[in-house]
């Protein structure tokens, strides 16, 4: 019996060590958590070249829960945190004057929120990638948006009252769209890189129409 117990111990001990290593690794990566909760105020941390102070909740020594971080360069974050990273709803204030209010995931802005530019511009995005941009210069845009700018279908209202509704590629009218000029005429047809190009029709203020083909804004063929 004693010999059997010794063998069992020799078998179990390496397994226990391995399990301990796995648990420590999972804990360090933030997949599992302990139970020691603490509230701190203006606690200073240094991470590489960055120094910041933190006020909020700690879970086993990690930034976790609601809190506020003030960075040495003037940036500031307030909101949810998980295992040292921004997580959930929060607000990031840039030292350059802009701010973002919305969702964060694993330390990154998801874009599902609202940007406030330093000059007063605003950009709102939702989970379906629908955006609304309002410029202090007087124009606004609503529709699809990605890292290249306006993308997909959308509506652009110019400062002078002109309106374009249709397809966009990299911030420019591209594909089919309708342009309404504030002087009363409109164009319904194809665009390329923001310019009338291809088949289309102009409806004049008096209701008369002109159909044809345009090449970079110049009509080259007319359909009677």
Image (cartoon, grey):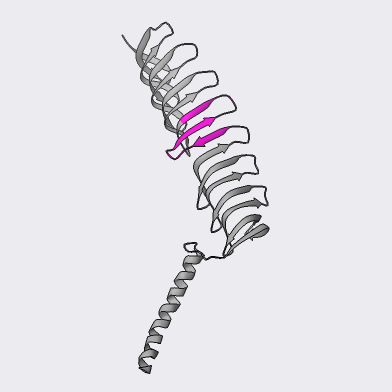
Residue at 50% across / 62% down in the picture?
30
Please state which of residues 41 and 110 is positioned toward the viewer in this rendering.
Answer: 41
Residue at 52% across / 22% down in the picture?
158
**Farthest top residue in view:** 206
Q: Is residue 125 magenta?
A: yes
Q: Quadrant of the C terminus?
A: top left
Q: For this view, does 60 lie left or right of residue 151? A: right
Q: Quadrant of residue 143?
A: top left
Q: Quadrant of residue 166?
A: top left
Q: Quadrant of residue 212?
A: top left
Region in magenta: 119-142
- Provide residue 156's location: percent of width, then percent of height: 48, 25
* Image height of 5 relative to 68, above or below: below
Please state which of residues 169 and 140 is positioned toward the viewer in this rendering.
Answer: 140
- Provide residue 69's location: percent of width, then percent of height: 63, 52
Residue at 47% across / 62% down in the picture?
31
Count of numbered marks: 0
Q: Quadrant of the N terminus?
A: bottom left
- Provide residue 106's location: percent of width, then percent of height: 50, 53
**Farthest bottom residue in view:** 2
Q: Is residue 122 magenta?
A: yes
Residue at 43% across / 28% down in the picture?
154
* Image height of 33 relative to 15, above or below: above
- Provide residue 13's location: percent of width, then percent of height: 43, 82
* Image height of 102 relative to 157, above or below: below
């Amino acid at each position: 019996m004693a010999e059997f117990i010794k063998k069992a111990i020799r078998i179990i001990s390496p397994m226990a060590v391995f399990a301990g290593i796995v648990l420590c690794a999972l804990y360090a990566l933030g997949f599992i958590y302990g139970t020691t909760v603490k509230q701190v105020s203006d606690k200073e941390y240094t991470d590489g070249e960055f120094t910041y102070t933190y006020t909020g909740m700690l879970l086993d020594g990690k930034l976790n829960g609601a809190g506020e971080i003030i960075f040495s360069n003037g940036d500031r974050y307030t909101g949810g945190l998980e295992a040292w990273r921004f997580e959930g709803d929060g607000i990031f204030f840039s030292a350059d004057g802009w701010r973002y209010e919305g969702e964060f995931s694993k330390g990154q802005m998801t874009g599902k929120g609202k940007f406030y530019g330093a000059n007063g511009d605003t950009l709102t995005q939702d989970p379906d990638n629908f955006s609304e941009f309002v410029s202090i210069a007087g124009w606004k845009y609503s529709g699809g948006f990605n890292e290249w700018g306006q993308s997909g279908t959308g509506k652009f209202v110019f400062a002078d009252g002109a309106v374009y509704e249709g397809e966009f590629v990299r911030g420019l009218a591209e594909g089919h769209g309708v342009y309404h000029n504030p002087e009363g005429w409109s164009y319904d047809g194809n665009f390329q890189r923001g310019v009338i190009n291809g088949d289309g029709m102009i409806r004049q203020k008096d209701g008369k129409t002109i159909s044809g083909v345009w090449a970079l804004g110049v009509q080259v063929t007319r359909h009677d």
